[in-house]
């Protein structure tokens, strides 16, 4: 058998055909070990490396070899339960590599090289590949044993081929499922559940086994849309047949695990939408029960987590959006009601996951106080007011219950819980007590909070206006110069935005002003390190300058806004960012949102305007010769370089004045943008004309209502730069 497999590997030139991700030298070394162990020379073919067999030849070779190796059997030696248990165990042990590391193995007819797959022409060829891999694992084990016998160290050794073998085993089970269930589903579609017996063919996998299979493929990250679609279709097919024959449908756990697997694998599609509708319909028909069985809290929380995760990944214009939204809303209503009825039965993770799920899709969102800026992610409902009232009652019950046991919540659970309340805009006395409780937990056990938890928790506290000094000081202490590189851009921007919004700023506000403040009047590094907020602002600025390309537009804007918001001048940061944005290989401004661009320009203008405060405070000690409005422009040039500041604002003007772009700007965005230009004394005629036309149109048609400050800023800006309207 060993010789047969080696002969097959040589003849089909395995490495070139579909195993090109493996290291060739490693395979050759393994072959040499194999030859040494079994004491025989490897077969050599003159054609190896010089020709590649076509698909039909490969299939023929594999069939011949397998026919010589296999013994005839009327049934598979593995039952469906054993196959699902194998997949479950390999996923649980994290043995198989994700498909991003080792591509999926599938039997496909496509020759499209862009598909990241290891393509086989038949199941027999896949089987031989598994045998070949298992032999290499055996060789490696023999080699380790031989090395150990000779006194060599093998402690902690890892066999890479063992990981690949685990992936190949999972893949071949997937292919067998696809082959078997595809024909079943086609027959069922043609004949229906009341058709010939072939349409009611006995299931190879029961619902529990199918749920375990999908869980395993999601957990190991080796699933694809075809596999998930076929298994889900088979689950629905079996359920229809079972119910038509008076039987029992699947259990709540089986459906919960199935939809969880879709979400974890990030797979959407028609079958996923069918599953959502099926769960909702069944809950409605059972008045909250699932075929007579009540969902457990974990099953409910896992289900709403999965539905929210899948919904958040939905692309605009996806078919069946209304069907999916309707199903999600109906499921969420039952979960909200269940939380009200038995919140004490929910564990901390189940509570936080449920609230997180509500907030992720905006279910029951309070537009007056919520923090959701992207309306498109809100799930559609035919009864927004009713849902809002239900969620208000649910969150009240949750707040009172959770406040009494916050010490049992893990850091991430506290983070998710508070984020959900901030996003949904829930405010009440009970909620305020919950916010204060979470703040105390952050201050009490800061070390348990990961960087993501720190950033999001501070952001949420600032959003709900819970400005607890101990909590913010504790969170800021994590953004120090020694740990800052562990923070991702979003975590840094969330943290610094929260501190600025809450009004927490460094003790030495002129610590970074290298343009105007003499060196002997700025704090030393030791003094800065002794100031928790000062060090956190310094650390975020350094990381933003070091890796600006990693920041998204909003994250970059939030960092700049935060410094200007609390009155901290940082010329080095702003110059570095300007060069990054408009440099030769810069990101430009075309991708910035209207709010993002308006806030970015405001931040630069505010930095220059802050020079007036420095001049007033330092007097003759300031490094500047001009005063008044000229000092503002001069400071912006000294901070950023005249070419940089002009180039930044010119490119911004082009982005705003481009065809139709100005119409997407809110009143505040328009006000901030022209105020920024006027503050620096920059007149861009095309920009001001486009803003003029847009404002006049809105005023004449009563499209939006301007606030007093917005009107004031607009008029001041036009007057300052002498932009005469028509």
Image (cartoon, rainbow, N blue to C red):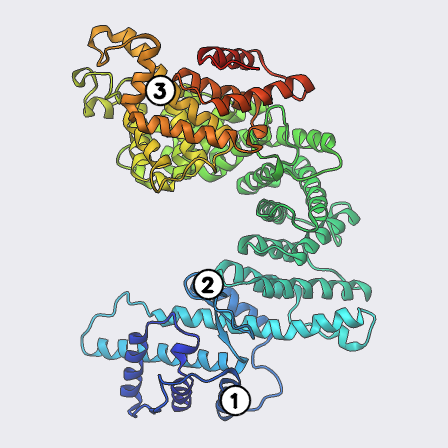
Q: Secondary structure at mark 2?
A: loop
Q: Secondary structure at mark 3?
A: helix
Residue bearing mark 3: 607
Residue 34 position (above or below residue 24): below
Disc nearest the viewer among 2 and 1: 1
Disc on res. 99: 2
Front residue of 507/636: it is: 636
Residue 216 seen: yes
Q: Quadrant of residue 645?
A: top left
Residue 142 position (above or below residue 489): below
Mark 2: give few (<14), some (14-19) or many (20+) Cα within 10 Å.
Answer: some
Disc nearest the viewer among 1 and 3: 3
On the rendered structure, is 322 left or right of 148?
A: right
Residue 450 seen: no
Front residue of 402/614: it is: 614
Front residue of 706/414: it is: 706
Cα distance in 3D space between marks 2 and 1: 28 Å
- Disc with the residue nearer the chain's start (2 vs 1): 1
Residue 568, image x, y percentages: 33, 20
């Amino acid at each position: 058998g060993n010789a047969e497999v080696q002969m097959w590997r040589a003849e089909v030139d395995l490495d070139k055909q579909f195993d090109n991700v493996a290291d060739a030298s490693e395979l050759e070394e393994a072959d040499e070990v194999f030859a040494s162990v079994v004491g025989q020379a490897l077969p050599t073919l003159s054609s190896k490396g010089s020709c590649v067999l076509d698909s039909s030849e490969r299939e023929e070779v594999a069939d011949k070899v397998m026919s010589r190796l296999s013994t005839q059997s009327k049934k598979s030696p593995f039952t469906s339960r054993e196959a699902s248990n194998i997949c479950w165990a390999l996923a649980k042990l994290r043995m198989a590599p994700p498909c991003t590391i080792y591509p999926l193995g599938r039997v496909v007819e496509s020759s499209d090289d862009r598909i990241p797959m290891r393509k086989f022409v038949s199941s027999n060829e896949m089987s031989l590949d598994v045998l070949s891999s298992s032999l290499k694992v055996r060789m490696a084990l023999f080699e380790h044993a031989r090395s150990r016998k000779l006194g060599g160290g093998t402690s902690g050794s890892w066999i890479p081929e063992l990981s690949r073998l685990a992936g190949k085993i999972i893949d071949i089970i997937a292919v067998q499922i696809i082959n078997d269930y595809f024909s079943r589903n086609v027959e069922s579609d043609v004949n229906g559940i009341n058709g010939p017996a072939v349409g009611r063919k006995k299931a190879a996998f029961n619902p529990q086994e199918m749920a375990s299979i999908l869980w395993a493929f999601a957990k190991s990250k080796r699933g694809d849309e075809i596999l998930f679609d076929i298994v889900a279709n088979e689950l629905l097919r079996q359920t229809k047949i079972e119910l038509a024959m008076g039987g029992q449908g699947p259990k709540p756990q089986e459906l919960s695990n199935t939809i969880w697997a879709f979400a974890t694998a990030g797979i959407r599609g028609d079958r996923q939408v069918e599953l959502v509708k099926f769960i909702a319909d069944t809950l409605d028909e059972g008045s909250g029960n699932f075929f007579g069985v009540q969902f457990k809290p974990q099953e409910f929380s896992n289900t709403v987590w999965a539905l929210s995760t899948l919904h958040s990944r939905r692309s605009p214009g996806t078919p069946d959006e209304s069907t999916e939204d309707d199903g999600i809303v109906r499921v969420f209503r039952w979960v909200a009601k269940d939380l009200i009825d038995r919140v004490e039965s929910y564990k901390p993770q189940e509570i936080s996951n449920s609230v997180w799920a509500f907030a992720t899709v905006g279910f029951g969102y309070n537009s007056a106080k919520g923090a959701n800026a992207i309306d498109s992610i809100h799930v559609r409902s035919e009864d927004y007011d009713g849902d809002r009232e239900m969620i208000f009652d649910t969150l009240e019950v949750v707040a009172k219950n959770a406040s009494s046991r916050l010490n049992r919540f893990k850091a991430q659970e506290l983070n998710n819980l508070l984020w959900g309340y901030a996003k949904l805009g829930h405010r009440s006395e009970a909620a305020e007590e919950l916010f204060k409780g979470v703040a105390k937990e952050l201050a009490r056990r800061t070390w348990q909070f990961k960087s993501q938890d720190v950033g999001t928790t501070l952001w949420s506290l600032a959003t709900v206006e819970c400005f607890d000094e101990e909590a913010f000081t504790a969170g800021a202490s994590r953004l120090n110069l020694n740990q800052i590189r562990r923070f991702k851009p979003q975590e840094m921007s969330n943290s610094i935005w929260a501190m600025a919004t809450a009004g927490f700023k460094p003790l030495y506000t002129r610590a970074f002003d290298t343009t105007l403040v003499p060196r002997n009047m700025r704090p030393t590094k030791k003094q800065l390190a002794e100031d928790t907020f000062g060090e956190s602002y310094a650390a975020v600025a350094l990381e933003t300058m070091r890796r600006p390309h990693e920041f998204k537009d909003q994250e970059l804007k939030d960092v700049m806004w935060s410094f200007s918001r609390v009155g901290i001048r940082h010329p080095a940061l702003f110059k570095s960012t300007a060069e990054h944005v408009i440099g030769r290989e810069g990101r430009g401004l075309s991708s910035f949102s209207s709010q993002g661009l308006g806030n970015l320009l405001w931040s630069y203008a505010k930095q220059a305007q802050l020079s007036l405060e420095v001049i007033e405070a330092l007097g003759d000690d300031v490094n500047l010769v001009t005063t008044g409005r000229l000092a503002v422009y001069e400071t912006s040039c000294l901070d950023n370089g005249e070419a940089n500041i002009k180039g930044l604002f010119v490119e911004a003007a082009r982005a705003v004045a481009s065809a139709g772009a100005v119409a997407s700007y809110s009143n505040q965005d328009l006000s901030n943008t022209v105020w920024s230009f006027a503050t620096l004394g920059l007149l861009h005629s095309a920009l001001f004309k486009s803003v003029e036309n847009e404002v006049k149109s809105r005023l004449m048609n009563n499209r939006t209502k301007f606030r007093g400050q917005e009107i004031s800023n607009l008029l001041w800006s036009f007057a300052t730069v002498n932009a005469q309207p028509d």
